[in-house]
Image (spheres, rainbow, N blue to C red):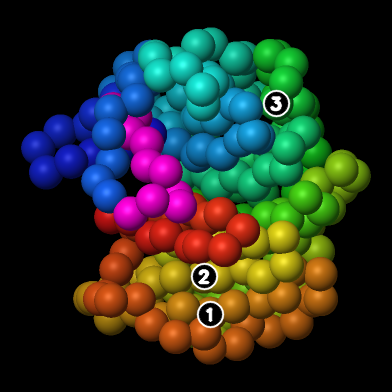
Amino acid sequence: AGGQDSSAVINTVQKIIVQVEGNSIDFGDLSAVRQASSGGGSNTRFIVAGGFQASKVNIIEFFTYTTAGNATDFGNLTSATDLLSSTCNNTRYITLGGNGTDVIEFVTIASAGNATDFGDLVNNLEEGHVGIISSSVRGILAGGKKGGSRSNQIEFVTIASAGNATDFGDMTSARNLLAGASSSTRGLQMGGDTGSGSGSNVIDFITIASAGNATDFGDISGNRTNSAGLSSPVKAIVAG
């Protein structure tokens, strides 16, 4: 949702059907042009939080999957933040870090309202949009940047229980601006920026229920950075 195309920041929201190959189609618009937001949701609602318009914003808004249309106001983050990441299950939507913070906060997806403090990350991430993975139980964050250096660290929260993030393990290489996707059991971290001047084509995987280091899974079709990932229980997609 939103972002920047070749000429300008946009407010466009598009959709695909994960099980059916084909091009994306228009769904609606955000309330204003915005980039560097986070997004995720339940089986019924998709939430977009934070981002950058003329400045950082604390906006939370949502869409209902079954009804194409424009965003509806949901509430506010505790502070204006961009470059944040998010994870969720069918009940809670959680934002993690963003622009040099360790803040974790959450909303209850079915009930519009302002975000509430959840805990803190292990690392203060200068740049979000990291590989996010989730099951119904755990939300997992991989990579990012800290102190100007890219990270290979993976950390997790238990979505139902507010508290600080816990170390999970390490990716096979340090990178940021990567895409995440997951089933209920396995998570993938795809592509990203290694600092070499070109994106990565690496795909790592972890088993969500078992903390440990990532393992090589394969490669995406080309080197990519700053992409988006999404998934069904059987298929993972990386876009952009």
* Amino acid carrying mark 3 in the image: Ile
Q: Which secondary structure type mostly characterizes the magenta part of the structure?
A: loop
Residues at discs 1 and 2 in contact (Cβ within 8 Å) = yes
Quadrant where the image shows the C terminus: bottom left
Residue hosting label 2: 189
Q: Is residue 13 magenta?
A: yes
Q: Is residue 26 visible?
A: yes
Q: Is residue 58 magenta?
A: no
Mark 3 or 2, nearer chain start: 3
Task: Calculate the distance from the C-alpha at mark 1 to the C-alpha at mark 2.
Answer: 5 Å
Task: Calculate the distance from the C-alpha at mark 1 to the C-alpha at mark 3.
Answer: 29 Å
Q: Judge whether 227 appears above or below 109 on screen.
A: below
Residue hosting label 3: 109
Residue hosting label 1: 204
Residue at x 50% of width, y 39% of height: 38
Quadrant where the image shows the N terminus: top left
Q: Is residue 56 left or right of residue 46?
A: left
Mark 1 or 3, nearer chain start: 3
Q: Is residue 109 left or right of residue 192?
A: right
Residue span colored magenta: 12-21
Residue at x 81% of width, y 69% of height: 209
Front-most of residues 7 and 202: 202
